Structures are given as structure tokens and as C-alpha cells.
Image (cartoon, helix red, strand yellow):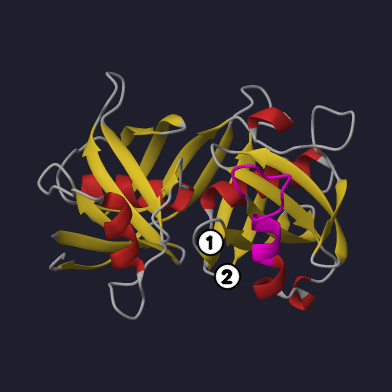
Amino acid sequence: MKFTKMHGIGNDYVYVNCLEETVDSPEETARLVSDRHFGIGSDGLILIKGASSKEADFEMEMYNADGSRGNMCGNGIRCVAKYVYDHGLTKKTKVLIDTRSGVKELTLTVENDKVSLVRVNMGKPEFAAKKIPVISDSNSDEVIRQRIQVAGSEYEMTCVSMGNPHCVVFLDDLNALNMEKTGPAFETQSCFPDRINTEFVEVLDRHTLKMRVWERGSGETLACGTGACATAAAAIRNGLVDDTVTVRLLGGELLIEWEKESGDIYMTGPATEVFEGEIQLP
């Protein structure tokens, strides 16, 4: 199987052009290629396919490192856009890509015939608990700054979906976080029926957030695009930052804008191709 290794600020995936390749068992393939000792090494597998809807140009099908199917990946979809342009599958600088969370519009910045930045319309944040989903113990339809006990400590969480379910937790000191203990404990809490992606966030100022993320099915990753959008939405909703904010992740920075007129959130960030290769599958 021919593949391309790419990353969006350190959130790395193995990409397969399924216009030319066939992947018979994507769940098992995702587990195999993601292994950083015996495989290629990645946060998961992303298949690039022809569009399944009339309005889109391509389709992105993503799998986490444990083989579970994901709905959407903000960093991953930027890399898909870079791949299809840089590899000559399209010369459009505005591309529509199918995902399990709907069709996403991407605007490409091209320098020297290569995509350097991608701006993605990530859609509207969803705060309704049932649609995230999260089981709330309050009378509210939303989970905003609700207290939760996890691994022997109490936290305040704001839950939001950006196509994937997210739990955003604001902390005074992100450096004091024990991620290996707290991340998996959040992921498997009974109030999250589909498990959860958890963002631990420190507010630096009205324009800047610092974030670490524990992704369901992959563990801690260097970046999460939908998580950065969820974090910005939660911070704006709680009055902590302005409508445009830079989110600093372990792998780099993303610019997140919440356009209040349309209700859509936009994410801008880089996409990088690392190398191409071929792997023999069992």
C-alpha cells in the first residue's frame, strides 16, 4: 500500500489516496500503521476518496490509532486539502470535502505551487447536551461550567461538539496537569456515552489560549483542530476571550475565528507533507 505521511502542527496521520489504492480493512490498517514501533507511526489513518455527495470535490474518511472511526479532524482535513492540490488532483483554491460531520469548505493559500496554509469553515458549535452527547445532571439543556469529579479531583467542564464530542476544562496552571492520569479518566467517564475528547486549557489573555488535548482512541496528541475550535467556542461562550483567538498547542498554533453573524467557526493553520512510502500489509 502506497501512503503519504502528513501532519497539521504535529497531529500526524498516514494518508492513502483511495482514488488509486484500495484499503480492505481500514480499522485494522489504522491500528497497524499507527504503531510508532512496529508500523509507520501516526495518530491514525485518513483515506482520501472521491466525493460521496454531489456538492463536494473529495471525501475524507478517518480512523483513530485504535481503529475506531472518527467523524472529523480539523488538522487532518487541512492535510487532505494540501494533498489533493499539491498532487495535482485539483487546481481549485477553494475545495469542498465530505466528512461524517458534513461537507467542509476549505480555502487554500498557495505559495510556489504548494499549499502553505488552509482556512477551514468548521461549521457551528453545538452546545446541546443530547447532541454532543453528554449526560447532564443539571436541569439545563447545555453543560456550561458544570462541576465533575474525575480521578479524585473536581473540575469545571464546558461541553461542545464540533462534529466530534469535546469536554473543555479551564485550569489555572496547565503545567501542573497529570495528563496520563486525568486524560484517560475523562475519556471513559460514564456521562460520555461515546467517550470524549478532553481539552485542558489555560487562558493567557483575551486573545490567546494554551491547550493540551487527550483524544479518544489516540491518547494525548500534539494538536487537535476540532478541539481547538471547541476550546475557542467554550472560552468565548464563557466570556473569557474575544471572538478571534490564537490557540497554542504542543505542536504549534491555530487561529480560530467565531463569526457571530453566520455562527460558523473558522480555523486557519498549516499542513505539512513529511514523506511518501510503501508498506506491505498482512
Q: Which secondary structure, mark 2?
A: loop
The part of the image, by quadrant, that contains residue 160 is top right
- Res. 153 image quadrant: bottom right
What whole-number distance in Å separates the C-alpha atoms at marks 1 and 2?
6 Å
Image quadrant occupied by the C terminus: bottom left
Quadrant for residue 163, please give it: top right
Seen at 54% across and 65% down, the residue is: 219
Please state which of residues 207 and 41 is positioned toward the viewer in this rendering.
41
Give the amino acid at mark 1.
Ala
Above or below, comparing residue 80 to residue 275 in the picture: above
Give the residue pinned by disc 1: 223
Residue 161 position in % (x across, y down): 62, 38
* Position above or below: 181 against 98: below
Work out whether residue 140 or residue 75 is closer to the camera in this orientation and state it.
140
Q: In this orientation, which residue lies closer to the viewer: 25 or 203? A: 25
Q: Does 221 sit left or right of 177 as displayed? A: left
Q: Answer with mark 1 or mark 2, whichever residue precedes in sequence.
A: 1
Q: Residue 6 vs residue 181: left or right? A: left
Residues shaded magenta: 183-195
- Amino acid found under the numbered disc labelled 2: Leu
Residue neighbourhood size for the residue with mark 2, other residues' Cα within 10 Å, grouped as few (<14), some (14–19), many (≥20)? some
Judging by the rendered image, the residue that carries numbered circle 2 is: 250
Question: Which residue extends farthest bottom?
Answer: 37
Residue 179 at x, y = what percent? Answer: 68, 72
What residue do we see at 42% from left, 33% from top? 100
- Which secondary structure type mostly characterizes the magenta part of the structure? loop
Labelled pair 1, 2 in contact (Cβ < 8 Å):
yes
Q: Residue sitting at 41 percent across and 61 percent down?
A: 65
